Amino acid sequence: MLNNKTLIALERQNFSRNLFVSLAHFHSLCDIKQEQLIIARLKQDDNAVKDIIEQRQIYVISGILCAVSFLEANINEILDAAKTYIYLPEARPKLEIFKKCEISVIENLAAFKDNLSRKLGTLERYQYALMISNKKPFNNAKAPYQDVDLIFDLRNLLVHYKPEWIESFAEGNSIEKDMQKIEKKLRGKFGLSKSIDEMKPFFPDRCLCYGCIDWVVKSIMIFCDDFFKRMNLVPDFKPSSIININKKGKII
């Protein structure tokens, strides 16, 4: 009874799934076929190429924003579920995420202070959840943590963009161009668009391509599946239940 009222239903919306589905959708819109189409039209000197490239960048930007939002929503939902499990026992049948989890882990997650959570960054919350549960935290200098951390850097560049001058130098018949800060961080992480001139800036021109969003999706999936495994959680959904990666590391 709550204030002389009888509880007849208890529902909880997990929005993280919506965010990952959105990411998967933007990934599907910005596929390798679109890159091939751009390259084919470049040979025809088609003026529509610029519009296609801008459209692709919209998909990639949207996907990156959804990816970071998903990660934050996901850890917030897990922490909220733990508090609900401990302090509202009648809700436990709906919280199958903890059906394989030790009660001590749930109690530790439930004790995660809201004021501390607000002070920690999203990835720090994942690490702290592992530590207070006596689980092995991620190595922040290696994948998958390092890759996801770079996705946050890319998201921050999109949200808090500041112009950056790029210097190019000519020496004989060759031209050398300074690398942007984000280029130094992301270099080698994914294949760049072959439809953009190499002398164009890494960000946004060459970076916001199919290779980028493909890397974002894979990094998020690997990170989350690893976290769930370490915590022994059975989430309502896993990113890998929406998108599959084959043995060659390609999304299918």
Image (spheres, helix red, strand yellow):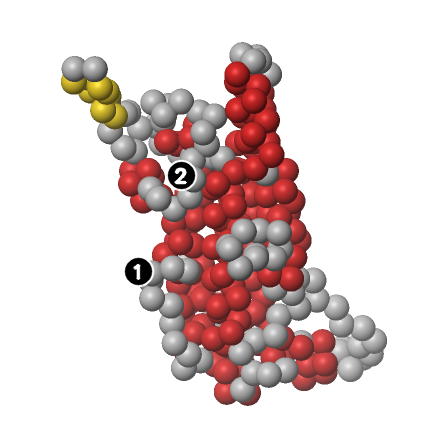
- The residue indicated by pointer 2 is 157
- The 10 Å Cα crowd at callout 2, few under 14, some 14 to 19, many 20 or more, is some
Return the disc, 2 or 1, that comes first in the chain's sequence.
1
Q: Is residue 176 visible to the viewer in this orientation of the structure? A: yes
Cα gap from disc 2 to disc 1, whole angstroms: 21 Å
Q: Position of residue 229 (x, y in %)?
A: 51, 74
Which disc number belongs to residue 187? Answer: none
Look at discs 2 and 1 and give the one toward the viewer.
Answer: 1
- Indicate the amino acid at tag 2: Leu
- Which residue is more in the foreground, 88 or 20? 20
The residue located at (40%, 39%) in the rendering is 157
- SS at mark 2 in the image: helix
Give residue 243's position: percent from left, percent from top.
Answer: 62, 55
Q: Residue at x 47, y 35 (%)?
A: 208
173 versus 224 height, above or below = above
Q: Position of residue 43 (x, y in %)?
A: 52, 16
- The disc at residue 141 is 1
Residue 202 found in image quarter: top left
The residue drawn where x is 51% and y is 55% is 248
Q: In screen coordinates, is 171 left or right of 101?
A: left
| Front-most of residues 251 and 227 | 251
Residue that lies at the very extreme toward the bottom in this rendered image: 103
